[in-house]
Amino acid sequence: MCRNLPDDEEDNISHIGDQTHHDPLEESSDRTDNREHSQQQRQRSGRNTGQKKPTMSTGGARRFRQPPRDVSKNVSPKPSTAKLCRLVIKPPSTLSVNQDIMTQYLQICLGDKFHFYPEDTKTADGGRCQFIFAFQSNNQGRKAEQLLKQNIENAGEEIEVSILKAEDALVTTETLLANCKMELQEKITVVRTHHTKKINNINDLLERHRVHKHIPLVDFEKISSEREALKHKKDELQLQQDEFRRFEAQLSSRLDAQRHQPLPSVENTIKELRKAVGRECARLDAALPMYARKSKIIGLVKENQVCVVLGETGSGKSTQMTQYLYEAGFAEKGFKIVCTQPRKVAATSLAAHVAREMGGVPGQIVGCHVGGNVQASKTTGIVYATDHVLLNECLKDPILSKYSCIIIDEAHERSLYSDLLLGMIKKSLAKTSRATSDHHFSYD
């Protein structure tokens, strides 16, 4: 059975039939001409951007190669740099600038959106300092470079700012740890020297207040009382010095433990240790009486379920105890440390003060629960609350299972809520001792 074909289909068939009778030499020459013609068309229509021609795979499907990326726009750091971008700042030799001043200068110029930390300080020939700051990402480092150059140009200063090359930024773990030790040791030495001067001043005062043979009875009593007070202060300063030395030993052991760790882990640990050193130096400089008993307090709380802590007003009971227990690990495994206050204003102000000392704001590590206002998050480990709030929680959960340590502050005021709370906690002591050994109660 046949059907009439359209004219175009007949032409196609005749064309195909004609191709079967072509001469092989003529066919190859035609193909060569077609290829040259196609290449000329692609060259005329293509852009002069260095784009490569498409290649044919064995299966006949076209596979295009990606054009080369502009490396100057996005410099990929080497794996060991852990995405850090290092900025080199060289002030003129006529300016006497240290690392702290340069860090504060960058914070003011760049604002809070940029996250960086000082990594190294070098002195070149001629006494010119070179500061290296590490930024979290390559993008942040380049933006910071542009902002600083613009600021320096507007101010008319002669300060060099540049990005450290990848091959120059390749540092080993040993080098990073060595630089960190030197940096932290400088801060520690300054604070320790200042504290030693305090002890020496006390010794000088004791030498001046020596009791002589021929002294009136009235003066003897006065000098004796002054000497007792000076001796007590000297002992307290020496205990604080011992506490700081314990921290130095722990710091050294933590740094040594990072020797065989990958560089990103080492850098994160160094960031944490910088914050810890800053907090500990501030404590030694403040020299609160509580700091002299830090290790003793932590040991007593670990060994006993109930502790009574007595101290003068301003000794640091409300602000320091929670921080000591947090650093000792009482806020791990999902537990929290709660400190109650009889008044809302006290709970709010203490939460803000402790959060500031720990390098944050209320709602992060340090939370606050006053009335219906709750400032807390998943990372919160310390909570300042009113005794009324904790009493309501105790009615719902008699053993207060989410708290590892409960501090009842200002317990001597004997408010109604405090007395009720103490009674309910006392009643639950037997249950908590059987349920878990992670619950501790402290009364101030």
Image: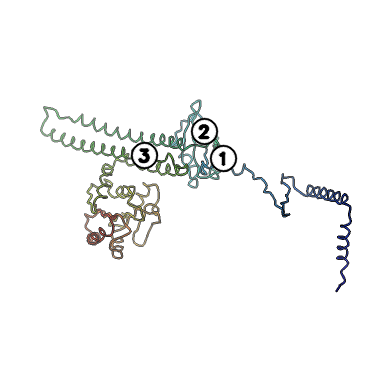
Q: Mark 1: which amino acid? A: Gln
Between tags 2 and 3, which lies in front? 3
* Disc on the earlier residue, 1 or 2: 2
Q: Residue at x 22, y 31 (%)?
A: 205
Q: Residue at x 61, y 44 (%)?
A: 73
Q: Nearer the viewer, residue 352 or 277?
A: 277
Query: Of the numbered discs in the image, which one, if any, rests on residue 150?
Result: 1
Secondary structure found at label 3: helix
Disc 2: which residue = 90
In which quarter of the view is residue 372 placed?
bottom left
| Mark 1 crowd level (few <14, some 14–19, many ≥20, 10 Å Cα) | few
* Disc on the earlier residue, 2 or 3: 2
| Mark 2 crowd level (few <14, some 14–19, many ≥20, 10 Å Cα) | some
Q: Is residue 63 left or right of residue 372?
A: right
Q: Nearer the viewer, residue 404 or 434?
A: 434
Residue 395 is at least partly visible in this image: yes
Query: Of the numbered discs in the image, which one, if any, rests on residue 418?
Result: none
Q: Residue at x 30, y 60 (%)?
A: 400
Q: Mark 3: which amino acid? A: Ser
50 over 433 or under it: above or below: above
- Looking at the picture, how far across and down is residue 45, in whole percent? 78, 50
Q: How is the image coloured?
A: rainbow
Between tags 1 and 2, which lies in front? 2
* Disc on the earlier residue, 3 or 1: 1
- Count the numbered circles shown: 3
Q: Nearer the viewer, residue 129 or 299?
A: 299
Q: What quarter of the picture does the N terminus occupy?
A: bottom right
Disc 3: which residue = 253
Q: Is residue 210 left or right of residue 323?
A: left
Q: Mark 2: which amino acid? A: Lys
